[in-house]
Image (cartoon, rainbow, N blue to C red):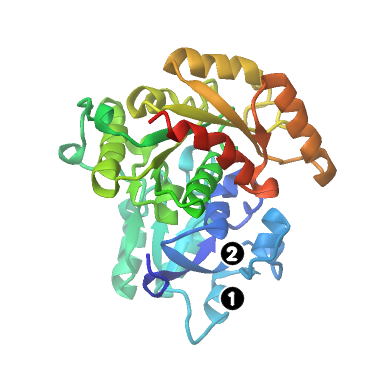
Amino acid sequence: MNSSNKRIATVYCEGAYNTTNGKTAHGLVRFTERYSIQSIIDSRYKGQDAGMVLDGKNNGIPIVGSIMEALSLNQKHPPTQLVVGLAPDGGRLDKNARNDIMKAIKMGLSVDSGLHDYLSDDPEILKAAALSKAQIHDIRKPPSIKDLHFFTGNIEKVKALKIAVLGTDSAVGKRTTGWRVVHGFREAGFKAELIGTGQTAWLQGAKYSLVLDSLVNDFVSGEIEFATYSCWQNEKPDVIVLEGQGSLMNPAYPGGFELLSAGRPDIVILQHAPARYEYDGFPGYPIHPINQQIQAIELLSGKKVVAITVNHENLAADQINEACEKLEKETGLPTSDVLVHGNERLIMALKPYLKQT
């Protein structure tokens, strides 16, 4: 998307930035082709740089304390869009967030939301939007059954190298790694595309997307196939990266099987947080050992996990390399943290598989 066509947006993430419940905001701070992000709203970090808080690197996106501050930040080019950057368990909208979103709508901001609580089903919000001429877009609202696709087998016609990025847990960084793989292959002179499977990838501008957890189960496989096959037909990329959801063994967000079954990847990257010991949000549910998760993926798909990528949450800077080395010895697979080490080593490990397709 041309930068001049991007919508100017502020991202609402009150109380959740720099937590797993703020992962939608994090994705937009790191990369989006759909919006020009002008600010992040979270009063806890007011006055700080969003990139510095998240990744230790300034990126020029300020964090403000309220919607009013976001509107007054640049009066010549104020935001026209409020993007809901929250990703709470179950995709539910709490009372305080609803009140803030209502304020934004009354101030004339259009709202894009990826939550399961649909703003367009709220009569008060709809009335306020009609008065202010604001637009409401619920990204996670299920499409009509007539617009959905059933699995056909067309996935076998896709000749690009298909790489699935799966994880050992939910909210572990699969989408971020997926984009880094796409950008790494593009920088190396190859044509690469991401198949987005959640609301954040759509918000970031993935051209071929579905919101997997909003679909009727009968059509999940078909929609994965349709997005991948459409991408192949229209773009003829060298590489297609499939964004994983949840994890195979997560008790609340089991995910990845449909991606393996319908997307039929050639190889798999596994994203892992070595300092996370229990499934996200579920104390008492220990994360299954990484080698067990690798075995499960390979048994289900018949394809190899070829690399491990690390989420460095709760690791000190001087512990990241040690954690990568330990995982490399444990799994026998090349291991890196793309946010710390960059994507060059990972791309080098993946390039040989292009010849096989």
Instruction: Quarter of the image for the N terminus: give it.
Output: bottom left
Disc 2 target residue: 41
> What amino acid is labelled 1 in the image?
Glu
At a point 21% along the width and 37% down the height, the residue shown is: 148
Towards the viewer: 296 or 81: 296
Label 2 SS: strand
Spatial distance from mark 2 to mark 1, Cα to Cα? 9 Å
Which of these two is toward me, 81 or 323?
323
- Left or right of 262, for residue 253: right
Is 35 in front, or is 189? 189
Compare residues 173 and 74 and report the one nearer the observer: 173
Q: Is residue 230 visible?
A: yes
Residue 288 in sight from this viewpoint: no
Vertically, is 252 above or below 314?
A: above
- Name the spot of residue 266 as percent of width and height, x first: 42, 27
Residue at image coords 43%, 75%: 107
Residue that badge 1 annotates: 69
Q: Position of residue 110 (x, y in %)?
A: 38, 67
- Total numbered circles: 2
Q: Are marks 2 and 1 in contact (CB under 8 Å)?
A: yes
Residue placed farthest to the left in the image? 146
